[in-house]
Structure formats: structure tokens, C-alpha cells
Image: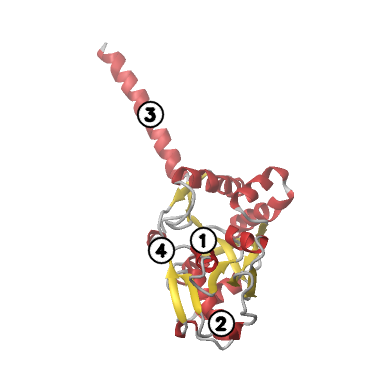
Amino acid sequence: MNFHWRRVGALLLGAWMCVSAQAQQDLTLGFSEGAASELTPPQLLNKYQTLADVIGRGLGRRVRAVYVKGFDDLEKGLRAKQFDLAVARPTDYMARALRLYGYQYVANASPDSQCLIITPKGSPIKSLKDIEGKRIVLPVRSAYMTKFCAAELRDKGIDLYRQKLQFVKEQSLIGMYLEAGMADVGVGVGSVTRMAQRWEETGNTILHRSVSEPYFPIIALPKFTPAQIASMRKLLLNMADNPGDQAVLKTLGIQGFHTDAESRLLGLLDWLGDT
């Protein structure tokens, strides 16, 4: 009897060691949409695992999606190189990882993103110059889209932070403020968001579209060889033409990937400046 249980124990230990070894061989794709995401953590894991599976095909390795709830945790994880690969919608985090933490560029989504400045239908505001002195609603100052629009307005000769500002925690609240008459102008709406699409569909006005910047970049640790990077890129570039991967793109809310934005991504932080 004792021999039997020792044998069972040895088998279980062996199985655990195999699973543990496999887990150690798995690569990780860290991702974050921030604490304000409308999806639950299990939904987010399912969403990003589809992308991890595509990348894994390119590498011939299993890639596990790793949910990172907040952007502070994302920054810490990138700094500590906890993720083999990473992807996030606030592009500035990925740009910092390239410049400061040794990651390398793989690809980014199509289309690029723009920062939108919006007004409600019937607004007398017709140009950027007209927004000066008006009540402006926008995301918190630390938000990427706020920095994005501040840099755009700076280039147009307008200091955003000298205006009458009302900060909100989520982009979705910007439209509510405008429609309720609580503000005159909305700043910092991402062009790729559902809110931007709904705003036009309901007859409201997009007053200004900023320059385009890379969106949804995928980055990787320097341990990946040029051949591995090329293999990942090939699969990502072909996703839009592969019927099996088109559902993945739809789940991610993008049209496809391209691989020619590395220099723009590296220059993003300089353009944002101290906004």
C-alpha cells in the first residue's frame, strides 16, 4: 500500500514538474486598458489572448496574455521587464518602454489615432481660435489624450492650460457635459473610440482633428532575434487578409497592423514635451 501511494505521489510530482516547466517556457504578453475599461478582467483576458495566440504562431511558442489593471502597474512591469511582449492603448507607455526600458518595436495598429476637439450641434464655435475663453471639458491632465491635444494646440498657438478647464475621469463623460450645457468644447477624445463614432452619428461636430500618431503598439524585449521579430510582423501584417484572424481584429477594435512607425513612436515623447 505504501509503495502504491509513493508511486502515485511520484507520478503527481512528475506531472506537476512538467506543467511547471511548460509554464516557465510560456512567453507573456502584458496588456492594459487602464482601470476605466468597460470590460471585466476575464473578458479582457479572452480579448487579448486572441492576439497572444497569433503572436505565438509566429514564434512557435505559447504566449499567455497577462492582465495589468492600472497604468502604474504597467509602467512598473515594463521597467522591471516582467513582460516578454507588451501592448497598450496609451501609446506613451509603449514609447517610454522603447526609449528607457530596452524594449524593441514590433508593430502598431491601423489606423493611427488622432485627438479630436468636439462641440455640440448648433455651437457658434467654428474654429480653434474660437475655443479660447470658452468652458473646456477634458480628461485628467495625466491622461495621454490630454497630453496629445495639448501638444496639438500648442503647435497651433493655443495654450490649453490657460483656458477654463473642467477635468473628468473618463472620455465618455465629455459628450455628456457638452450635451448637458455644462461645457462649450470637448478636448481629448480619441479618434478610435466608440464615443467619437457616436458623436458624429448623432449630428454633433468634430471641430478639429489632430495630426496622426501611432496607436496600439506591440513591443518586445531585446532577447527576441531579428528573425523572430520578422516572423511576428509577417503574421500581424497578414491578419487583415486571413479570414481566421479577421475576427481577432474585430475583437481588438482595429483594422489591422503595420510595421513602419518605429521612428514616429520614438519621437512621440519629444513631441508631447512637458504638456
Residue at x 62% of width, y 57% of height:
227
Residue where numbered disc 2 is placed: 131
Q: Amino acid at mark 3?
A: Gly
Q: Is residue 76 above or below residue 163?
A: above
Relative side of 108 to 64, left or right: right
Badge 4: residue crowd in 10 Å (few <14, some 14–19, many ≥20): some
Q: Nearer the viewer, residue 76 or 24?
A: 76
The extreme top residue here reads 1
Relative side of 30 to 243, left or right: left
Residue where numbered disc 4 is placed: 75
Badge 3: residue crowd in 10 Å (few <14, some 14–19, many ≥20): few
Badge 2: residue crowd in 10 Å (few <14, some 14–19, many ≥20): many
Q: Nearer the viewer, residue 106 or 19?
A: 106
Question: Total marks drawn?
Answer: 4
How far is the residue under mark 1 from the one under mark 4?
Answer: 24 Å
| Marked residue nearer the N-terminal end (1 or 2) | 2
Q: Nearer the viewer, residue 199 or 29?
A: 199
Residue where numbered disc 3 is placed: 14
Mark 3, mark 2: which one is toward the viewer?
A: 2
Whether residues under marks 3 and 4 lie with C-beta atoms below 8 angstroms apart, the answer is no
Residue at x 61% of width, y 75% of height:
123
Q: Is residue 14 above or below residue 43?
A: above
Residue where numbered disc 1 is placed: 172
Percent position of residue 50, x then y: 57, 45
| Marked residue nearer the N-terminal end (4 or 2) | 4
Q: Secondary structure at mark 2?
A: helix
Percent position of residue 235, x then y: 66, 51
Residue at x 58% of width, y 50% of height:
55
Whether residues under marks 3 and 1 lie with C-beta atoms below 8 angstroms apart, the answer is no
Based on the displayed image, in which of its 4 quarters is residue 5 positioned?
Answer: top left
